[in-house]
């Protein structure tokens, strides 16, 4: 994940919650993709360290156990830059230009001709991030699947070119949650750059106030108008945070018995309930900021060890070193 500060519910239900569940069954590596923030925000580097601490605090508060699964920072493991360079040599420029996520970003951020070489090649850096730890499964939101495909192609290409008899890299699979594309409060995909988020760290009052303003079915104007839950983003939130009551909410909305104000209030309550233990852990961590810094230092150490082993296999496969 890129450290853009505090995380939103889309990051949580699309990826982070899955990381927490998977850490019992997999050997997880949790990478803070700080170089990746430069793809679109290269002018603002001073805020990155603070954003890293905010994000890692959210990760640990959400239940990542750093002893089980290292949390580390991309720019502290320089081997990522080397593998990125090597992979850039074997990927076609046209392949990267076809990346649909890049096309979405160019449209949303109105970049047009301002796309940098680093932005174009960021799926290659992401491939290096995954391949460095021989990733087999990558738990991400839907927008990331095209990048996992680039990673699969690069792993295959590297193996075919340099290690046909003893492949160095597995071809990773993307792993989606039930909510791979959570909507934001305006109905578009929840995203910090669109300003339509509920943050994991938002207070109960902030969550209620934000939900009150959420867009609902435009055909449901008055309380007793029948609504269409499947076009309403608030119903999507109920499906995630209020599973037990979704049937009742659906029928109430469809019949007109349940108005949007009540529906949103109930939704806010369930979200707050879900986030309360995360908020408690966050407060505890905020009182001990040195703990987060220690977690990252230890994660960097563990990640560098694994990266050194992978790079020695890469060097051997490519015939580098005398
Ligand atoms: P990013 O902030 O782009 O680095 O995203 C971090 C992770 O959160 C990625 O796995 C994304 O796919 C996921 N993610 C971001 N926004 C959403 C969303 N609205 N719904 C589901 N997953 C998301």
Image (spheres, grey):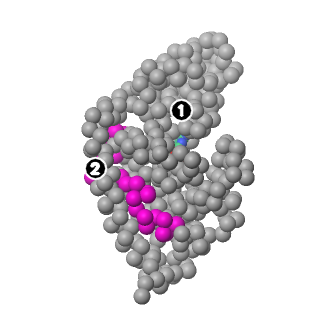
Q: Position of residue 298 (x, y in %)?
A: 29, 55
Residue at label 1?
Answer: 197
The reply to whether residue 258 is in sight is no
Q: Which mark is first along the chain, 1 or 2? A: 1
| Residue in view at x 51 percent, y 76 percent | 159
Q: Which residue is mark 2?
A: 294
* Element marked by disc 1: loop
| Residue in the picture at 54% in, 69% down | 85
Q: CA distance from mark 2 to mark 1?
A: 30 Å
> How far from the left and from the top, in percent, is residue 160?
55, 79
Instruction: Residue 272: tell me if it is visible.
Output: yes
Query: Residue 259: x percent and y percent?
Result: 57, 14
Residue range corresponding to the magenta coloring: 61-84
- Would residue 80 be found to the left or right of residue 306 on screen? right
Residue 78, magenta (yes or no):
yes
**Looking at the image, which is closer to me, 172 or 58?**
58
């Amino acid at each position: 994940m890129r450290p853009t500060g505090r995380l939103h519910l889309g990051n949580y239900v699309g990826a982070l919650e899955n990381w927490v569940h998977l850490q019992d069954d997999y050997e997880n590596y949790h990478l803070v993709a700080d170089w990746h923030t430069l793809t679109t925000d290269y002018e603002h580097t001073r805020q990155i360290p603070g954003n890293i601490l905010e994000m890692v605090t959210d990760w640990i508060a959400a239940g990542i156990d750093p002893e089980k699964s290292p949390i580390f920072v991309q720019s502290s493991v320089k081997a990522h830059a080397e593998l990125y360079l090597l992979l850039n040599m074997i990927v076609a420029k046209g392949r990267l230009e076809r990346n649909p996520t890049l096309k979405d970003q160019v449209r949303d951020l109105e970049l047009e001709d301002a796309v940098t070489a680093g932005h174009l090649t960021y799926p290659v850096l992401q491939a290096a991030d995954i391949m460095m730890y021989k990733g087999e499964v990558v738990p991400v939101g839907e927008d990331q699947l095209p990048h996992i495909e680039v990673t699969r192609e690069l792993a295959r290409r590297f193996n075919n070119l340099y290690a046909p008899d003893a492949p160095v890299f597995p071809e990773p699979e993307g792993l989606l949650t039930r909510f791979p594309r959570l909507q934001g409060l305006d109905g578009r995909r929840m995203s910090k750059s669109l300003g339509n988020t509920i943050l994991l760290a938002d207070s109960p009052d902030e969550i209620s106030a934000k939900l009150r303003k959420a867009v609902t079915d435009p055909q449901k104007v008055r309380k007793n108008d029948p609504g269409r839950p499947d076009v309403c983003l608030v119903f999507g939130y109920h499906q995630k945070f209020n599973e037990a009551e979704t049937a009742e909410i659906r029928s109430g909305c469809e019949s007109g018995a349940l108005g949007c104000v009540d529906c949103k209030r109930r939704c806010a309550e369930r979200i707050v309930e879900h986030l309360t233990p995360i908020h408690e852990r966050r407060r505890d961590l905020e009182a001990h900021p040195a703990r987060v810094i220690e977690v990252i230092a230890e994660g960097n150490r563990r990640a560098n060890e694994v990266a050194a082993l992978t790079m020695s296999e890469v060097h051997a496969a490519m015939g580098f070193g005398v």
